Image (cartoon, rainbow, N blue to C red):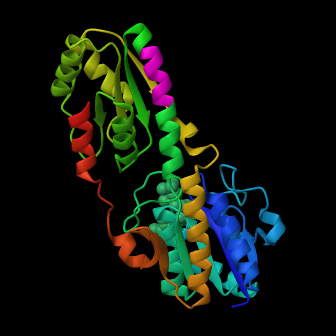
Amino acid sequence: MKKIAVMTSGGDAPGMNAAIRAVVRYAVRNDIQVLGIQRGYAGLLDEDFIEMDFASVGGIMEKGGTILRSSRCPEFVRKETRQEAAKILAKHGVEGLIVIGGEGSLHGAMFLEEEQKVPVVGIPGTIDNDIAMTDMSIGVDTCLNTVVDAIQKLKDTASSHERAFIVEVMGRSSGYIATVAGLVTGAEAIVIPEIPVNYEALGNKILKERERGKINCIVVVAEGAASAYTVARHLEHRIGYETRITILGHIQRGGSPTAFDRLLASRMGVAAVEFLKRGTSYVMTALQGGKIVPVKLDEVLKQKKSLNMELVELTALLS
Ligand code: ATP
């Protein structure tokens, strides 16, 4: 293998740069040239490429976002567009493609190999932790730490003013961030897509906590379950005191990646190049039982990652 390409696609996640760095440096050490594709699938179609070498990825590990930038490219769902993309890659002598991104991006990669025979390896990079068959995706740990830090700050002001704070966090289809953040900050309750919300019970729980003498109250809401405004509207008349809403939004995507994410990204980046080198493609790098292993893309993408309900029980048990 003489030349590969790497891209980041979909929503950015902290740690993507560490993955790019690992891909480039491990490839260069193995005498493989690396083409960086800027702006995901849109950049691939525009031939927005840069040659990458050992030095070009210096000083990027600690940076949030992605130096290759990212995009959404709706036309990539069309087979003809992917055919065009494969032709472009062949024209540039690319023998393998590494795609760092979430479920949508991995779908695009899967189809590129299935139909167009472009050898691909996916690296799970998304803050949602909604990708199956891997214990963690790159960016989840950093996002969690950002959310925990924000909730901790809100708890200070919630205690001072004896208010209830409704905090909306990311998680379109997964309550993972809300659950773990709720668990480790001692939030009163979590509202997640996996469990239908019972406002009556939620209101009663908050009132009981107050009777018990607790002066702050935090409810963590995953965006996919309800909006913080809806939760606040349902709760205010039940608990009889003021609520305050905080939507963390895109702040959760940014920031310098944690040591965990840097390590995971470095290991996955190296593994992705190694898989391509060995002729193992149509796979995603997955963290399973502490090891980085290849898992088939079609198997990953036909599954929905389910939330570990023990975490939800633990949250309820300890709050
Ligand atoms: P995140 O979930 O973290 O935002 P993602 O990779 O899932 O990341 P999407 O916007 O779903 O983000 O997908 C990114 C890009 O991948 C899309 O803009 C499109 O170019 C491509 N893509 C998504 N779904 C498909 C699909 N079914 N077939 C081919 N390409 C797809």
Q: Is residue 216 left or right of residue 256?
A: left
Q: Is residue 74 visible in the rendered structure shown here?
A: no
Image coords of residue 269 (percent x, y):
61, 70
Depth check: give the residue in front, 206 or 5.
206
Is 157 included in the stretch rendered in magenta?
Answer: yes
Note whether 33 is above or below 300 in the view shown: below
Note whether 313 is above or below 49 in the view shown: above
Quadrant containing the N terminus is bottom right
Depth check: give the residue in front, 175 or 116.
175
Note whether 94 is above or below 177 in the view shown: below
Depth check: give the residue in front, 51 or 141.
141
Quadrant containing the C terminus is top left
Q: Is residue 161 visible in the rendered structure shown here?
A: yes
Identify the residue shown where x is 70% and y is 65%: 21
Identify the residue shown where x is 25% and y is 34%: 318
Which SS type dominates the magenta stretch? helix
Image coords of residue 213 (percent x, y):
25, 11
Is 135 included in the stretch rendered in magenta?
Answer: no
Magenta part of the chain: 150-158
Residue placed furthest toward the right: 55
Identify the residue shown where x is 35% and y is 16%: 216
Note whether 59 is above or below 177 in the view shown: below
Q: Residue 82 is drawn in which quadrant?
A: bottom right
Q: Is residue 81 left or right of residue 36?
A: left
* Tag count: 0
Q: Residue 190 is drawn in which quadrant?
A: top left
Image coords of residue 37 (percent x, y):
71, 69
Identify the residue shown where x is 31% and y is 27%: 231
Depth check: give the residue in front, 46 or 36.
36
